[in-house]
Amino acid sequence: MPARPDKKAVAEVLEEIATLLALQGENVFKVRAYENAARALTRTREPLDELIRTGRLQSVRGIGSSTAKVIREYYETGEPPALLRELRAKTPPGLLELLEIPGLGPQRVRLLYEKLDIRTVADLEYALQENRLQLIEGFGPRTIETIRQGLELYRAASGRFLLGKVYPLARAIEAFFRQRWPGPVRLVGSVRRWCPVVGNVNLLLQGVPPSDPSGLGLDQAPVRLDVVEFQDPTWWLRVPSVGLPVVLTWVPAEDWPWAVRYYTGSREHNQAFQAWTTRQGYAWVGLRLQKDGVPLSLPSTGTADGVYGDEPIFERLGLAWLPPEVREGQDEIERAARGDVPRLIEPSDVRGVLHVHTHYSDGADSLQEIVETARDLGLEYVGISDHSPAAYYANGLDPDRLLHQWAEMEEVQRRIPEVRILRGMEVDILPDGRLDLDDDLLERLDFVVASVHSRFQMPRAEMTERIVRAMRHPCTTILGHPTGRLLLGRKGYEVDLDRILEVAAETGTLIEINANPYRLDLDWTHLERARRMGVRFSIDPDTHRKSDLGDYVYGVGIARKGWLTAADVANTRPVLELLELLRQKRRRRA
Ligand SMILES: [Zn+2]
Ligand SMILES: [Zn+2]
C-alpha cells in the first residue's frame, strides 16, 4: 500500500498546482481555488483520513469538487496527481527556479517570461544588466531594485546548503562508511563544526583508498552517491537528489591526528593555530609540526571510540582540547592556551522545549501528537506557542480559540502526565511595540514568545524601539528569532542589536536561539558577547510539525559555537525551576 500523504504534504501539492496554474496565466479564480483548498486543509482540525473515509472533504469550507478530486487522487495513490504532472510537463523548468528568487512570485515570473522571454536565472541576470526590466509595464524602479537584491541573495546562496538539510544525510553517510571501511572514519569540516550553512560533506578515512570506486559498494549507500572524480587520496562524490558534494579523503595512520585537526578547523582557525605554534618556536612540515628539526611525537594515535582523533596534538602542545564547533578563528587558541574551555552545553542537557506550533495556528499536528512526540524524545516539558491574531496569514488564535486550546491542554495533560505542557503563545510585536494580546490573557500564560512578523522594513531606530518596548512588557519571557533573518533567503531587519541585548539583560528577557534550520537566529557570532552582557537564552525548535521537534539539537550546535554552557540556557532547567525563572521577570516588574 502506498504511504498516505499527510495534510501538509497534500497542502504542498495543492500549492504547487496553484503556482503552476498562475505561471500558465490561468484565471485567478482557478488559482485561488487551489490556494484556498491548501489553506483550508491546513486549518481544519478534522483528520484527513476521517474526511476522506466519510466522503466529507467538500464539507470543509474552501474545498470544492475539483480540488477534492485532486486531494483524493493524491491521498489514494501517493503519487503526484495527473493535473500536477501535466502542469509540470508544460512549464519550462527554469521558471520554477526563478520563483526561488526572493521577491519573485508567479505573476512577475510569468510577465518576465511572456514579455522578455526570460526562462532562466541567467536570462534574468542578463536582462537586469541591460536594464530591460523597465520595458515591462508595471515594473517600476523599486520593483526592479527588489528583484536585483533578491537575485544577489540567490546567487550568494547557490552551492550552499542549510545545515539542517545536510546534517542527517552527513551522519547517515558517515555511518555507512564506518560500516564498510575497516579503519576509523570521521566527519570533519563545516558540517562537523555545525555551521548554519555548508557547502559539502567532508569525511576522513584512515588507510589507503581502494583502487577503484566499485570496491566500496556505493550502491548499498543509504542515499544515491555518484562518483564525480577520484584522484588518490581524494574522492569527490555527489548526492544527486540535492546536488550535495561529498568529499572523502584517505589518510595514512601515522598522519591521522594531524589530518583530523587540519580538516576540522576553518581556514581562519588553521591560520591562528599556525601563528600560535610558530610563536612557540615550532615549524610546519606539511600537516605536521617539528621543533629544532625534530618531528613532534604524539602520545597515542587516539582512534578509539568516543575520541575525536586530534586530542594528542592539543595534549602535546599543552592546549586544552577544543570542540570542533568553536574552531572558527575567533580567540579559541588563546582560550585553549589559558585552559579556559568550559564544558559546553550538550543535547542531553536540554530538559524541555518552548515555542512549538500546533494545528491551532500554522502547525501541521495536534496537541496530542506533539506531546506524544515530546514524550518519545524524553523531554520533561513542552511549551505550546501558537500565533496571536495579528498573524492572520498563519491562522493566529483569537481569545476564544486560545481558551479552547487551554481546555484541550488540560485534557491531553491528563492523558499524558509524564510531559508537563506549558501554556504559551507566540505573540506578535505590533509596529508600535505593543503585544498583540490583552494583558489579562498574557498574565495567564506560563510564557510568551514575542516576535516581529510584520513591517520588516522599519528604520533601524524605530525597529529597535519597537522591540525594546515589547521586551519591557513584564509578560514577555522570550524575544523570538531576534533578527528575523532567513538563512539563504532574507537578511535580518535593521536593528541595534547591542541595545536589544542590553535591555534583555536588564529586564531578564530570554533571548531565543531559534533552532529552526531556516533561522538559527540569534546568530552564533553574537552569543558570547550577549552572555558576557548578562543575557540568558532559550533554545527553541519553533517547529510546525511533530517530526521536527528534535530540531532543537541545531540550536544546541549553535549554542556550542557561541561557547554557551548548560547554565546559560533556561530550558536546561527542571520544569519547576524553569517556571520560577519565567515568573521572576513578572514579579520584578510588578
Ligand atoms: Zn515567529
Ligand atoms: Zn514560531
Image (cartoon, rainbow, N blue to C red):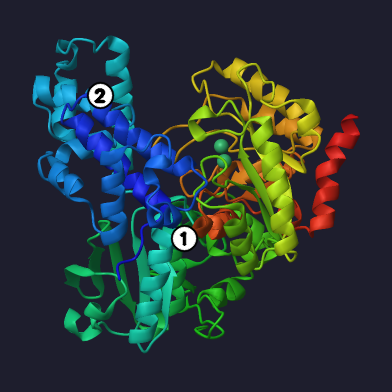
Q: How many marks?
A: 2
Q: Quadrant of ligand 2?
A: top right
Q: In this view of the protein, which residue sits in the foreground, 52 or 513?
A: 52
Q: In this view of the protein, which residue sits in the foreground, 532 or 372?
A: 372
Percent x, y of residue 305: 53, 84
Position of 142 with respect to 124 (left or right) is right
In the image, which disc is placed on residue 265?
1
Residue 473 seen in the figure: no
Q: Amino acid at mark 2?
A: Val
The C terminus, quarter of image:
top right
Percent x, y of residue 428: 62, 29
Percent x, y of residue 451: 61, 32
The residue identified by callout 2 is 28
245 shown above or below 133 = below
The N terminus, quarter of image:
bottom left
229 shown above or below 473 = below
